[in-house]
Amino acid sequence: MKPYLSIENMTQQFPDGNGGALTVFENATFGVEKGEFVVILGHSGCGKSTIMNILAGLAEPTSGAVVMDGTEVKGPSLDRGVVFQNYSLLPWLSTLKNVTFGVAARHPEWTKSQVIEHSTKYLAMVGLEGDVIHRKPSQLSGGMRQRVSIARAFANHPKLLLLDEPFGALDALTRGTIQDELLKIWGGTEQTVFMITHDIDEAILLADRILLMTNGPFARVAESVEITIPRPRNRTEIIEHPNYYAIRNHLVHFLGTRSKAMAGAQSDKSHPNRPQTVRIDKTDGADDPEGRQPALRAVNS
Ligand SMILES: Nc1ncnc2c1ncn2[C@@H]1O[C@H](COP(=O)(O)OP(=O)(O)O)[C@@H](O)[C@H]1O
Ligand SMILES: [Mg+2]
């Protein structure tokens, strides 16, 4: 059976400025299950935002398809909520109206006060309360604008939440609070989350699975690393888990060395490029009488 969100043989090329073509990625093929929280990690320029724009329906790949819940993604939809890397608020609307705008479109049956109450709740959740919600985006700091953009996406309860480095502009304390809110919102719903970050610790805290991308051009989603740490997770306790540093080291090594070593090679065009599943579980066989130490297992999906 097809996964809930299915990315099939997706290839993206852009003109390279010299009359040729830059291949960002080729035949990328992977899936995301309903309710899953998937994070994509990769160096700047490998094509993460390009993937996000395609999933959002804001760009079309050169070839290949994205299918969500049995329907091909063509154009944007309220079922897919996006937090962009550059927050993209409507500059002529107040902070509050940037949120109510989408909520009213999603719930045409709601009264004006219901829309405002709902939107205000989500703004408060990201720490925006009082007079500030009547200011225009240009009167807010970068971090505040980022939070409006997060509130706007969360308030719409999209089936698929697409987050492109959503916490990049936030200070560490705010980032922690909003990560916790995100986990709370996601935990209470059937929502599927697809998020980009370059923060390894954030990725381990949040994800069910981390997709690792090699450097471009011809970037590949090379691995799908399962986060074998039970939920609920808490940022201070998680580091005590026996799998934490094993997973972290694997990710650091990939980004530090392997993402470069595997980069730049044109693939065999006839095959979809699927990530390899990696499961690291130090707790596996802990009661094994022979005391074997199963460490890192790679399983082909
Ligand atoms: N509209 C575009 N036209 C030409 N090149 C582009 C365009 N968008 C992205 N690129 C190029 O595609 C590559 C991937 O970009 P991007 O998806 O933004 O990477 P990331 O988000 O991983 O940092 C980069 O080399 C970038 O310069
Ligand atoms: Mg990007």
Image: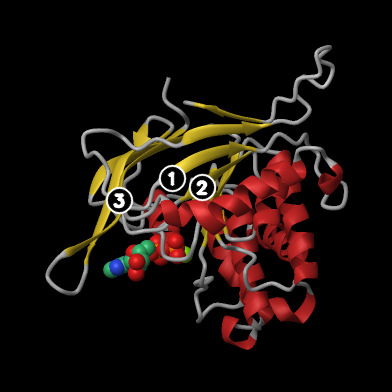
Residue occupying image coordinates x 59% and y 52%: 253
Compared to residue 129, the image places residue 196 above or below, namely: above
- Secondary structure of the residue carrying tag 2 is strand
Tell me the number on the disc at residue 221: 1
Please name the amino acid that badge 2 sits on: Leu
Q: Residues within 10 Å of mark 1 (few under 14, many from 20)?
A: many
Q: Earlier in the sequence, mark 3 or mark 1?
A: 1
Q: Which residue is mark 2?
A: 212
User: Label 1 vs label 2: CA separation?
Assistant: 6 Å
Q: Is residue 251 visible?
A: yes
Q: Earlier in the sequence, mark 2 or mark 3?
A: 2
Q: Please identify the quarter of the rendering in which residue 209 is found.
A: top right
Total labels drawn: 3
- Secondary structure of the residue carrying tag 1 is strand
Where residue 163 appears, x then y in whole percent?
Answer: 55, 56
Residue occupying image coordinates x 81% and y 19%: 291
Tell me the number on the disc at residue 30: none
Q: Please identify the quarter of the rendering in which residue 177 is found.
A: bottom right
Where residue 7 appears, x then y in whole percent?
Answer: 38, 39
Compared to residue 241, the image places residue 155 above or below, namely: below
Please name the amino acid that badge 3 sits on: Ala
Labels 1 & 2 near each other (Cβ < 8 A): yes
Q: Residues within 10 Å of mark 2 (few under 14, many from 20)?
A: many
Q: Which residue is mark 3?
A: 265
Residue occupying image coordinates x 75% and y 54%: 181
- Residue lying at the far bottom of the rendered structure: 139
